Image (cartoon, grey):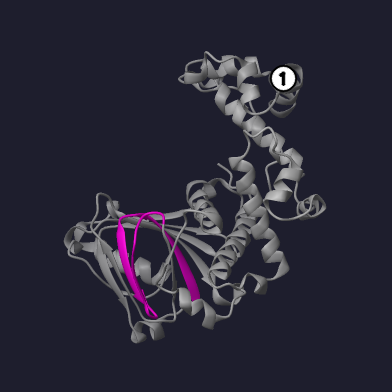
Amino acid sequence: MWTRSTTATLPKAERFEWFNEIVASALIPTAIRSELSADFQAEVSMLDLGVTQLSSFAHSPLHSRRTPALIRRGDPEQYQLALITGGRWWMSQCGGDEEFGVGDLILWDTSRRQETVAHPGNGPNASLIVHLPKDALPLRSGRVDRLLGRRIATDSGMGAILAQFISSLGSHGAACEPQELHRLGSTAVDLAAAVLAQRLDAYGELPAEARARALRERIDAFIEHSLGDPALNPGLIAAAHGISVRALHLLFRDQPESVAATVRRRRLERCRSDLARPELAARSVHDIAARWCFTGAAAFSRSFREAYGISPSEYRRKAARPAAHPGNEPASRTVNPRAGAVAS
């Protein structure tokens, strides 16, 4: 679960000092100054992911510097990868000198000098930070240096998948069991390694297991965006990723579900969601099922009941009842959650 701390409960005179101490213990010792130190506001959360950790920071504008003296004072020997979720930023490290905004990824080395500015904006400066132990990242440090302090785009490809994965961890990680979080932590490291390796043209240097997990995440994202395509099947998925259908099935053989079962479950989840939406009340159950590629009414109803213990029509009626009465909430159950999926 998230471990949360906030300045909201502290006297104003103690907030900035508290934040400095939290950054030093949760991230790295850093010299921080802020024009708003007299009225500094911040919230910090940490989520244990086993091999790695996710930290969430939201705070007032600031200027931070990491010097050789501070490196000697404390160095976890990590790469730290941040997804910017609020504000405007600038960072300088190891020759990299760039500005960043919401949605960008940025990497730094805790063993190197660093300077960061979080600019004022409409809301707090905020980020989700994945702590990557250097010995857990299967890339040579000399090559990774080329990415330090430089913007990593997330508008497409593996960068987009990694950013979505980190964001999902931040939103839903607290609902996961410890063993699930540890599995997700391993996936986060593999995805980060895949993104960095692609940027360095070193993807072939990754261990086969790391490449396989990263490929499964790419396939997972492809499935999620293609659920409304009637042609979505193992053949199409394999072709879109340049592998054979046999290789696709082998990739999923140690997962709780087959590829086809994953597609079917997620389509059922979309149907269940649509059946509960008031703005779709005028659409028939059959139309909603067809939207997500269930063409036979009897087969859809049977599949829905097997998954959720209730018929589609009954689920819709219960979902339409006033939410103020807890006993009227639609009955449902989760079936076969995908290993590594973020629980909500």
Vertical relation: 187 (above or below) 255: below
Return the residue nearer the eye: 123 or 281. 281
In the displayed structure image, the side of residue 119 where residue 156 appears, left or right = right
Task: Assign a secondary structure to mark 1.
Answer: helix
Q: Is residue 15 magenta?
A: no
Q: Is residue 83 magenta?
A: yes
Q: Amino acid at mark 1?
A: Ser
Q: Residue at x 58, y 41 (%)?
A: 225
Residue at the extreme right of the image, as rendered: 246
In the displayed structure image, the side of residue 36 where residue 226 appears, left or right = right
Q: Position of residue 216 (x, y in %)?
A: 67, 54
Q: Residue at x 24, y 54 (%)?
A: 121
Q: Residue at x 31, y 69 (%)?
A: 20
Q: Quadrant of residue 95?
A: bottom left
- Residue annotated with mark 1: 301
**Does any portion of residue 46 appear in the rendered image?**
yes
In the displayed structure image, the side of residue 168 where residue 291 appears, left or right = right
Q: Quadrant of the C terminus?
A: top right
Q: Position of residue 307 (x, y in %)?
A: 71, 29
Counting labels gives: 1
Return the residue nearer the eye: 19 or 89. 89
Q: Position of residue 85 (x, y in %)?
A: 38, 53
How many other residues sit within 10 Å of disc 1, few (<14), some (14-19) or many (≥20)?
A: some
Q: Residue at x 75, y 46 (%)?
A: 256
Q: Quadrant of residue 318?
A: top right
Q: Position of residue 267 (x, y in %)?
A: 65, 32
Query: Which span of residues is magenta-colored?
Result: 78-103
**Does any portion of residue 1 appear in the rendered image?**
no
Return the residue nearer the eye: 109 or 99. 99
Main SS class of the magenta portion in the image: strand
Q: Quadrant of residue 31?
A: bottom left
